Image: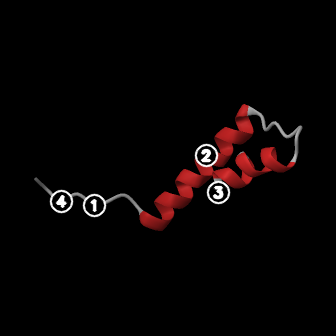
Amino acid sequence: MISNYVFWPRMLLARWEPDEAGIAHAVDQAVLTMLARYGAPETRGA
């Protein structure tokens, strides 16, 4: 997910430079996707 926005365009487009806000958004969305898919492990009372 992150590489689709940050890494690959830089490899293919010499002048591609996403701004910090765009990178932060891509990372945030990747984290939300991972949490939605796998979720945080449940903890049971200690």
Badge 2: how crowded within 10 Å, few (<14), some, or many (20+)? some
Residue at the top extreme? Answer: 20
Number of other residues with Cα within 10 Å of mark 4, as a class: few under 14, some 14 to 19, many 20 or more: few
Kindly identify the amino acid type of the residue bearing the numbered disc 4: Arg
Q: Amino acid at mark 3?
A: Met
* Marks 3 and 2 close (CB-CB < 8 Å): no
Name the residue tied to disc 1.
42
Determine whether the residue tagged by mark 2 lies in a helix, strand or loop.
Answer: helix
How far apart in space, not on screen, are marks 3 and 1 (Cα)?
26 Å
Q: Circle 2 is placed at which residue position? A: 27
Q: Are marks 1 and 4 in contact (CB under 8 Å)?
A: yes
Identify the residue at image location x=43%, y=65%: 38
Disc number lying in front (1 or 2): 2
Lower sequence index among marks 4 and 2: 2
Q: Residues within 10 Å of mark 3 (few under 14, many from 20)?
A: few
Question: Is 22 placed above or below 45 here?
Answer: above
Q: Which residue is mark 3?
A: 1
Picture coordinates of residue 1, whole percent (x, y): 64, 57
N-term-proximal mark, 3 vs 2:
3
The three-letter amino acid code for the residue at tag 2 is Val
Tell me, for residue 44, which label it has, or none. Answer: 4
